[in-house]
């Protein structure tokens, strides 16, 4: 799970799917990028695209804060790939849940 602290109210925001980043405002996106040591500059669309790549484990060196050492950059790349969200797996669970609900409705 990827955590982000709300800078205004100190509430936790959990990002579980790539689509959730499209509901967050720019200040949250910037903080999340900073927290993950990604570049935190650019438009809202660029930040969302960068975070989407991070969550999918497909970030590149261009996405990482350029003030970090090569070793730190490599660690971030590895961490992103290790902690990536498996969207295919989540989708598979959703399909199973829909099928199960359909079966229950047919029985009733």
Image: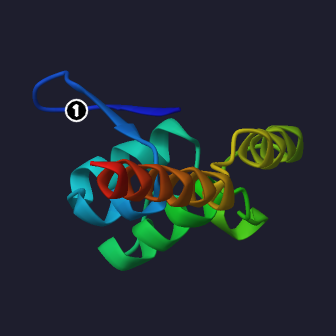
Q: Position of residue 76 (x, y in %)?
A: 75, 43
Q: Position of residue 13 (x, y in %)?
A: 30, 34
Using the image as rendered, state which of residue 35 and residue 98 is in the foreground.
98
Quadrant position of residue 88: bottom right
The relative height of residue 33 versus residue 12 in the rendered view (above or below) is below
Using the image as rendered, state which of residue 83 and residue 74 is in the foreground.
83
Q: Mark 1 falls on what kind of element?
A: loop
The relative height of residue 27 versus residue 1 in the rendered view (above or below) is below
Quadrant position of residue 9: top left
Q: Position of residue 34 (x, y in %)?
A: 47, 43
Could you tell me which residue is drawn at 36 percent across and 59 percent down?
21
Number of residues whose C-alpha sits closer than 10 Å to that of mark 1, classed few (under 14), some (14–19) or many (20 or more): some
Could you tell me which residue is drawn at 58 percent across and 52 percent down?
90
Using the image as rendered, state which of residue 26 and residue 65 is in the foreground.
26
**To which residue does mark 1 refer?**
6
Could you tell me which residue is drawn at 71 percent across and 63 percent down?
59
Q: Position of residue 35 (x, y in %)?
A: 48, 36
């Amino acid at each position: 799970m990827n955590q982000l602290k709300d800078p205004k109210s100190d509430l936790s925001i959990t990002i579980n799917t790539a689509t959730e980043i499209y509901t967050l405002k720019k200040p949250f996106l910037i903080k999340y990028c900073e927290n993950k040591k990604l570049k935190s500059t650019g438009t809202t669309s660029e930040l969302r695209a960068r975070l989407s790549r991070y969550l999918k484990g497909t970030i590149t060196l261009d996405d990482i804060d350029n003030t970090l050492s090569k070793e730190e950059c490599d660690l971030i790349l590895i961490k992103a790939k290790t902690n990536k969200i498996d969207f295919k797996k989540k989708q598979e669970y959703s399909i199973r849940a829909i099928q199960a609900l359909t079966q229950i409705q047919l029985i009733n």
